[in-house]
Image (cartoon, helix red, strand yellow):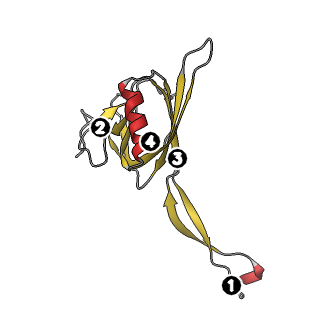
Amino acid sequence: MSDAMIGFGTRFFMAATAGATALTKLAEVTSVGFPNEQVAEVEVTHYESANRTREFILGLNDAGEITIELNWIPGSATDELIQAAKGDGRVRTMRIVTPADDDAQMYTFPGFVRGYERTAPMDDKMTATVTIRVAGAVVQANAVADPTVLA
């Protein structure tokens, strides 16, 4: 039997302001992308590289961007929080918490809102996609009872 899980119950949190000590849960989230850390490669080829072959060393980590999809409710607390975060352009604390079970994990990282795309189709739900640039290290840990509190 498989140990696969569905993502139902995953939650996304964002600090209301830069430097805040508490996080606010975004409402109506339907999909969360996780940071995808990749290491840059730095070319170090020189005139005497063996067999005229390029040489590389590892560079710095880059956690990239994530996207969050949600049901868009104009004027809601979530809508206002995202608009404020995009408007001020400040780096703030973000957190993803996997579904609540014995092995729930949380991923905490600094980030800023790069984009907030909203759509209003004629005969379907209104949705929004939030693009967040991960602006530093991602810390993975066991989830805590109250993920809104920053230690």
Q: Name the residue under label 3.
A: 65
Q: In x, y percent, where is residue 87? A: 43, 42
Q: In x, y percent, where is residue 42? A: 60, 71
What residue type is disc 4 on? Answer: Lys
Residue at position x 51%, y 42% in the image: 66
Element carrying mark 2 = strand
Determine which quarter of the picture holds residue 94. Answer: top left
The one of 91 and 139 positioned closer to us in this rendering: 91
Contact (Cβ within 8 Å) of mark 4 with mark 3: no
- Mark 3 surroundings within 10 Å by alpha-carbon count, few (fewer than 14), some (14 through 19), many (20 or more): some
Q: Mark 4 points at which residue?
A: 86
Q: Name the residue under label 2.
A: 23
Q: Of the two numbered discs 3 and 1 on the same chain, state the one appearing first in sequence.
A: 1
Q: In x, y percent, where is residue 84? A: 39, 38
Q: How far apart are marks 4 and 3 (CA)?
A: 14 Å
Q: Of the two numbered discs 4 and 3 on the same chain, state the one appearing first in sequence.
A: 3
Contact (Cβ within 8 Å) of mark 2 with mark 1: no
Please, is residue 93 above or below residue 1 in the view? below
Callout in the foreground (2, 1): 2
Callout in the foreground (4, 3): 4
Callout in the foreground (4, 2): 4
Contact (Cβ within 8 Å) of mark 3 with mark 2: no
Q: Of the two numbered discs 4 and 1 on the same chain, state the one appearing first in sequence.
A: 1
The image's mark for residue 46 is: 1
What residue type is disc 1 on? Answer: His
- Mark 1 surroundings within 10 Å by alpha-carbon count, few (fewer than 14), some (14 through 19), many (20 or more): few
Element carrying mark 4 = helix
What residue type is disc 3 on? Answer: Glu
Q: How far apart are marks 3 and 2 (CA)?
A: 20 Å
Element carrying mark 1 = loop
